[in-house]
Amino acid sequence: MTDRQLRILFVEDELNLAEIVRESLESRGFQVTHLATASTALEAYYNQKPDILILDVMLPDADGFALARQIRATDMDTPVIFLTSRSLPQDVVTGFESGGNDYLKKPFSMEELVVRIKALTSKSRTLFREMADPDAPVIIGSQYAFHYRQALLKRNEVIVSLTAREAELLKLFLLNRNQVMDRKSILLHIWGNDDFFTGRSLDVFITRLRKYLQHDPEVRIMNIRGVGYKLIG
């Protein structure tokens, strides 16, 4: 996918900032649709099927987190970058739990935004993301069935609803089952960067997946010291 073919849906209600960002991205060959509200953005998303979404967190009729959750109900793959002036670590975690792939704090440089767009849309990012049949359940160990499209983890009659990011991370582990995955690769493939906040978020998600999978002794997410993780099961 070339930059000129890339379709960006950009949702930002600060019109001066939005104009600067839109013009800068278009000057680099991207196709940009800018909207200022969540409601118009959701309609445009369904009509246009963009390659990537850039969402401001604070919008006049909703927040970007809620918009992302609506999109993730049917689309687990289109990358989402959040733009925000919020700086609390919990806001970052909320962004990723809502289905975001990256989180960029204002003010930011256009160069940084472009790098993150390219990282999230590059072909190399899809190497670990293909499933033979995304609608078919994946068996984990002897007790679990993972339904990726529905973001559900089932054990007998117990059903756990996963967040979009938990489902993406579990999918990545299953596509690389019994193989060592280095921490940086996980961060880059899921979030598009490996900064401090995404690293902390990854730690939270690993802990949660381990808790969900703790009932089957055949299944483990192992720490590989100095490298990353390995899913066995």
Image: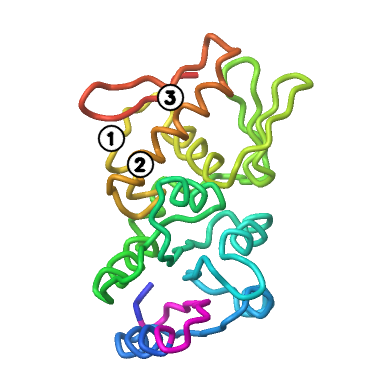
Dot 2 alpha-carbon crowd within 10 angstroms: few under 14, some 14 to 19, many 20 or more: many
Range drawn in magenta: 4-18
Residue 101 against residue 166 in the figure, above or below: below
Nearest the viewer among 9 and 67 is 67
Residue with the mark numbered 3? 231
Nearest the viewer among 180 and 183 is 183
- Point out residue 202 in the picture as x, y percentages from the top left corner: 40, 38
Under mark 1, the amino acid is Asp
Residue 63 falls inside the magenta stretch: no
Residue 206 located left or right of residue 67? left
Under mark 3, the amino acid is Leu
- Point out residue 57 in the picture as x, y percentages from the top left corner: 51, 65
Residue with the mark numbered 1? 182
Under mark 2, the amino acid is Ile
Q: Residue at x 50, y 78 (%)?
A: 12
Residue 80 located left or right of residue 140? left
User: How far apart are the two marked residues, 2 and 1, measured between alpha carbons?
Assistant: 7 Å
- Point out residue 163 in the picture as x, y percentages from the top left corner: 60, 43
